[in-house]
Image (tube, grey):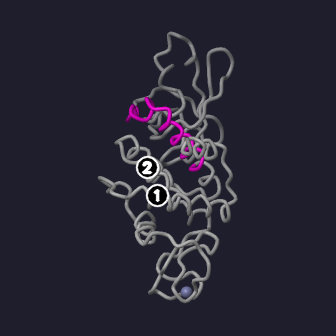
């Protein structure tokens, strides 16, 4: 029986001369391996529809414990803005690698929704670093290292928060403050917004460069210290951001 499955191709491997095996990150079936017979042939209509970062509805003979078999594909969005921009492709690469890694640790299908919404927002032209940082923050609970953003990390005090510090693991209040970097007031507030915002509802972003940088700095440091994830695509992205 043919099953219609929504997803994004996250990997492709050649198989023989004319076929390939793709991995699709799907809404309902997690990461699904699919055999695509004959699609590398020049004549195949599916040739262009079975490459990495194709987002669509896949019609497959679904097999639970082995490779499913591809029959057809309908594109849902070609993410043209991203694919025409080498810089945005680096973001897509990183977000895909990150999401896959997080998914493998928690098997939480909600990640799919966050990931696709994030990619859609980047494709709509919203600041890719902000969207990436929002996803990175939202993934933290799935990695078991969620943030407490209602009180001081050290004493639980809910007022007089003066900064946020990755080494301390969150907010620091006036009386616990020693020598941490003092971030912009707005940074303290915006991190909370990033953490709780519904990605789908974001229409525009008005955030200063300074705040964007401080939040990115916090997240990079927090990931280094608490998540154990060191992704090459992230290193590459950071290098691009320094240029
Ligand atoms: Zn405190």
Please tell me whether mark 2 sits on a helix, a strand or a loop. helix
Q: Is residue 74 left or right of residue 157?
A: left
Residue 110 showing in the rendered view: no
The residue that disc 2 covers is 118
Q: Nearer the viewer, mark 2 or mark 1?
A: 1
> Residue 172 lies in what quarter of the image?
bottom right
User: Residue at position x 52%, y 57% from top?
Assistant: 216
Percent of width and height locating residue 96: 55, 44
Please tell me whether mark 1 sits on a helix, a strand or a loop. helix
Residue 55 showing in the rendered view: yes
| Magenta-drawn stretch contains 87 | yes
Q: Viewer-proximal residue, 41 or 159?
A: 159
User: Residue at position x 49%, y 48% from top?
Assistant: 28
On screen, residue 142 above or below 128? below
User: Residue at position x 51%, y 19% from top?
Assistant: 47
Query: Which segment is the magenta one?
Result: 77-99
On screen, residue 12 above or below 41? below
| Total numbered labels placed on residues in the image | 2
Q: Quadrant of the C terminus?
A: top right
Mark 2 residue's CB less than 8 Å from ligand 1: no
The residue that disc 1 covers is 134
- Pointers 2 and 1 in contact (C-beta within 8 Å): yes
From the image, give the main secondary structure of the stretch colored magenta: helix
Ligand 1 visible in quadrant = bottom right
User: Residue at position x 59%, y 53% from top?
Assistant: 103
On screen, residue 154 above or below 24? below
The first of marks 2 and 1 along the sequence is 2
């Amino acid at each position: 029986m043919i099953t219609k499955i929504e997803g994004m191709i996250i990997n492709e491997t050649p198989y023989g001369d004319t076929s390939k095996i793709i991995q699709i990150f799907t809404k309902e079936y997690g990461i699904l391996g699919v055999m695509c017979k004959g699609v590398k042939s020049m004549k195949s209509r599916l040739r262009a529809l079975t490459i990495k970062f194709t987002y669509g509805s896949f019609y497959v003979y679904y097999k639970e414990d082995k490779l499913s078999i591809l029959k057809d594909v309908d594109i849902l969005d070609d993410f043209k803005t991203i694919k025409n921009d080498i810089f945005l492709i680096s973001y897509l690469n990183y977000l895909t690698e990150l999401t896959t890694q997080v998914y493998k640790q928690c098997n939480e299908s909600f990640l799919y929704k966050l990931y696709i919404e994030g990619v859609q927002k980047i494709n709509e032209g919203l600041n890719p670093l902000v969207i990436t940082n929002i996803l990175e923050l939202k993934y933290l609970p799935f990695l078991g290292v969620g943030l407490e953003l209602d009180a001081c990390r050290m004493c639980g005090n809910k007022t007089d928060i003066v900064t946020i510090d990755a080494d301390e693991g969150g907010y620091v209040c006036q009386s616990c403050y020693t020598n941490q970097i003092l971030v912009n007031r707005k940074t303290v507030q915006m991190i909370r917004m990033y953490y709780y915002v519904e990605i789908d509802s974001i229409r525009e972003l008005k955030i200063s460069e300074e705040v964007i940088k401080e939040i990115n700095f916090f997240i990079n440091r927090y990931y280094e210290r608490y998540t154990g994830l060191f992704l090459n695509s992230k290193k590459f992205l950071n290098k691009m951001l320094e240029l």
